[in-house]
């Protein structure tokens, strides 16, 4: 997408130099769309960073368990 934006900027410069006013206007619309898309992609990249919470080791899991009461014998 950055290559597209850079290409559009070069084409706008060329069109201005050649005096192609209609072409400049159309390229500027395309450039605005490319810049909006780049902004969207950057915002999405900031939101989607995964955070590693780590994998608990067996000892950490075992310490987190609770002991249960043994059932009391039933009187016959």
Image (spheres, rainbow, N blue to C red):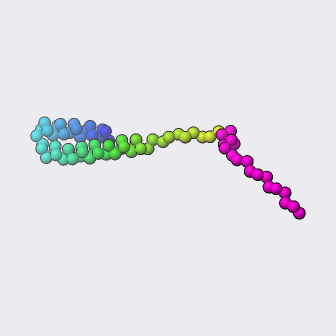
Residue visible at 22% across and 38% down in the picture: 9
Instruction: Give the percent coordinates (x, y) of residue 65.
Output: 69, 46
Left or right of 25 in this view: 40:
right
Instruction: Tell me if I can see residue 58 in this picture.
Output: no
Q: Which residues are magenta?
A: 59-76
Between residue 32 and residue 22, name the one nearer to us: 32
Residue visible at 80% across and 55% down in the picture: 71
Instruction: Give the percent coordinates (x, y) of residue 31.
Output: 24, 43
Q: Say which quadrant the C terminus sits in.
A: bottom right
Between residue 22 and residue 68, name the one nearer to us: 68
Magenta segment includes 21: no
Residue visible at 50% across and 40% down in the picture: 51
Q: Residue furthest left?
A: 19
Residue visible at 76% across and 52% down in the picture: 69
- Residue 10's quadrant in the figure? top left
In the picture shown, does residue 74 fall above or below 11? below
Q: Residue furthest right?
A: 76
Instruction: Tell me if I can see residue 1 in this picture.
Output: yes
Left or right of 45 in this view: 29:
left
Magenta segment includes 71: yes
Instruction: Give the percent coordinates (x, y) of residue 52.
Output: 53, 39
**Figure label count:** 0
The kind of secondary structure the magenta stretch mainly shows is: loop
Left or right of 56 in this view: 29:
left
Q: Say which quadrant the N terminus sits in.
A: top left
Instruction: Give the percent coordinates (x, y) of residue 30.
Output: 23, 46
């Amino acid at each position: 997408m950055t290559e597209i934006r850079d290409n559009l900027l070069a084409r706008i410069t060329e069109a201005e130099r050649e005096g192609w006013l209609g072409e400049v206007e159309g390229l500027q619309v395309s450039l605005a769309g490319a810049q909006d898309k780049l902004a969207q992609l950057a915002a999405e990249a900031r939101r989607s960073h995964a955070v590693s919470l780590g994998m608990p080791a067996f000892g950490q899991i075992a310490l987190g368990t609770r002991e249960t009461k043994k059932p009391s014998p039933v009187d016959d």
